[in-house]
Image: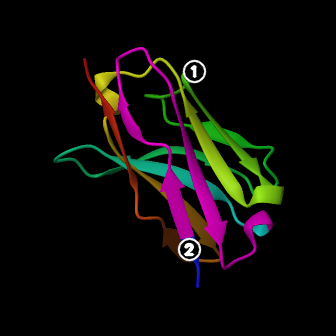
């Protein structure tokens, strides 16, 4: 029943912006810390950003700090990732993650391609 559905990915030129969304259902969203991970071609899973269950605390990987912003909307059970000043190195499949107790839930991923 737990479901995370990412959307908003696509093809964008370097320097451009994208806004990813992760719609959650099947669990209590307001009690779950949420995160974004990404996987570049041929690479392992990389943590990108996290937000606390109350939406107040945020943290970012150094590679995206100052360019990406994570936020959440409890009324919509949705977490967002605003990505600005995109670089080719940001290319990959972006996954939404929810952690409840010691259980991790994952979305299907959305492709982000940054290329000229």
Q: Is residue 110 above or below residue 97?
A: above
The quarter of the rendered structure image containing the N terminus is bottom right
Q: Is residue 26 magenta?
A: yes
Q: Residue 63: which quarter of the image?
A: top left
Q: Residue at x 34, y 19 (%)?
A: 13
Q: How many marks?
A: 2
Q: Is residue 54 above or below residue 19?
A: below
Left of 83 or right of it: where is 73?
right
Q: Residue at x 47, y 17 (%)?
A: 85
Looking at the rendered structure, the secondary structure element under dot 1 is: loop
The quarter of the rendered structure image containing the C terminus is top left
Q: Is residue 59 magenta?
A: no
Q: Which residues are magenta?
A: 4-30
Looking at the rendered structure, the secondary structure element under dot 2 is: strand
Q: Residues within 10 Å of mark 1 (few under 14, many from 20)?
A: few
Residue 113 at what x, y percent from top left?
A: 31, 34
Residue 27 at what x, y percent from top left?
A: 69, 77
Left of 73 or right of it: where is 24?
left
Which residue, as the protein is rendered here, is positioned at the far bottom? Answer: 1
Left of 95 or right of it: where is 68?
right
Residue 54 at what x, y percent from top left?
A: 82, 54
* Foreground of the two, 64 or 76: 76
Q: Residue at x 78, y 68 (%)?
A: 31
Q: Residues within 10 Å of mark 2 (few under 14, many from 20)?
A: some
* Foreground of the two, 66 or 87: 87
Q: Residue at x 48, y 28 (%)?
A: 64
Which residue, as the protein is rendered here, is positioned at the far left? Answer: 42
The residue carrying mark 1 is 66
Between marks 2 and 1, how big is the CA–CA gap? 30 Å
The residue carrying mark 2 is 3
Q: Earlier in the sequence, mark 2 or mark 1?
A: 2
């Amino acid at each position: 029943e737990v479901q995370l559905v990412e959307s908003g990915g696509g093809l964008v030129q370097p320097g451009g912006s994208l806004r990813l969304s992760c719609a959650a259902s099947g669990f209590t969203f307001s009690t779950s810390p949420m995160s974004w991970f990404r996987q570049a071609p041929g690479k392992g899973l990389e943590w990108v950003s996290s937000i606390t269950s109350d939406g107040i605390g945020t943290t970012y990987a150094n590679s995206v700090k100052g360019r990406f912003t994570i936020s959440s909307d409890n009324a919509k059970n949705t977490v967002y990732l605003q990505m600005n000043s995109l670089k080719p190195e940001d290319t990959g499949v972006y996954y939404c993650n929810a952690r409840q107790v010691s259980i991790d839930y994952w979305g299907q991923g959305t492709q982000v391609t940054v290329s000229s």
